[in-house]
Amino acid sequence: MTDTPLPSSNAAADSTMEGASKIHDTPPEHLDEAQPETQHEARLWRDDGWTARVIKNEDDEGWAVAMIKDGEAEPALVGPWTMGRNKKDPKPLDTSAFNTLVKTASEVLRRHEQQLRAQLHKEVRVASADGNNELDITLDIVPDEDEPYALLTALDTFGEQLAQVQVAPNFKLSKASAAAWVENEFRRPG
């Protein structure tokens, strides 16, 4: 059984606690469900799977904007935000600014994904064992928290998989190590 909080006679306390209880009582996975799909306010703009929130910049006296993709816990982009005409309050968000922020934040995420893919995927081309064809040898690291590993794969010129073995996540893929694996008839490298 849960107790229902009773209204307080202190209106200021109620308004401060109301926002806090919504943040702390709602599990993170349900925060997006409780929020409206589209919201256009001066300091909060939610649309097209993104939320732009104008916040006080803790590093100086200005303002910042945080761009958060729906379903993500951390912002994809945090950057400085323009002061309003009174040089005290932030400039209100608008459609044009929001679209620019979405484009910039999407580009940041795309670059991050490309960088992560480059770290987790390596590829070299070597001659086949008979020397008549070329093979693409790939190394894909699986960053499992408990037991990370990597998959070493040989593909023919048509992209058909010829062999695949599991190796240590710190396996160094090079032309030499790939050629040695091919010459060793795709046995798991020691």
Image (tube, rainbow, N blue to C red):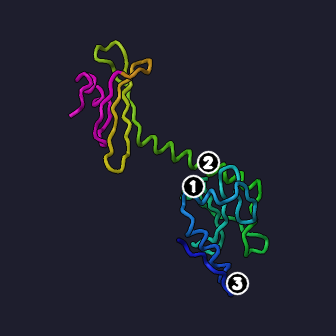
Which mark is nearer the camera, 1 or 3? 3
User: Magenta residues, as a range?
Assistant: 162-190
**Residue drawn at (28%, 31%) of the image:** 177
Query: In this rendering, is residue 91 above or below 14?
Result: above
- Residue 129 figure quarter: top left
Q: Is mark 2 on a helix, strand or loop?
A: helix
Side of 120 where 67 appears, left or right: right
Q: Which is nearer the N-term, disc 1 or disc 2?
A: 1
- Kindly identify which residue carries mark 3: 11
> How far across and how far down the image is residue 63, in percent?
66, 69
**Residue drawn at (26%, 27%) of the image:** 181
- Residue 21 figure quarter: bottom right
Kind of residue sitting beneath label 2: Ser
- Kindly identify which residue carries mark 2: 106
Circles 1 and 2 in contact, beta carbons < 8 Å? yes
Query: In this rendering, is residue 137 above or below 71?
Result: above
Query: In this rendering, is residue 162 above or below 190?
Result: above
Q: Which is nearer the N-term, disc 1 or disc 3?
A: 3
- 178 drawn magenta: yes
- Residue 148 figure quarter: top left
Quarter holding the C terminus?
Answer: top left
- Kindly identify which residue carries mark 1: 76
Q: Name the residue at the bottom extreme.
A: 9
Report, in whole angstroms, how far the alpha carbon at label 1 lies from the one at label 2. Answer: 8 Å
**Residue drawn at (30%, 28%) of the image:** 178
Q: Name the residue at the front extreme.
A: 1
**Residue drawn at (56%, 48%) of the image:** 109
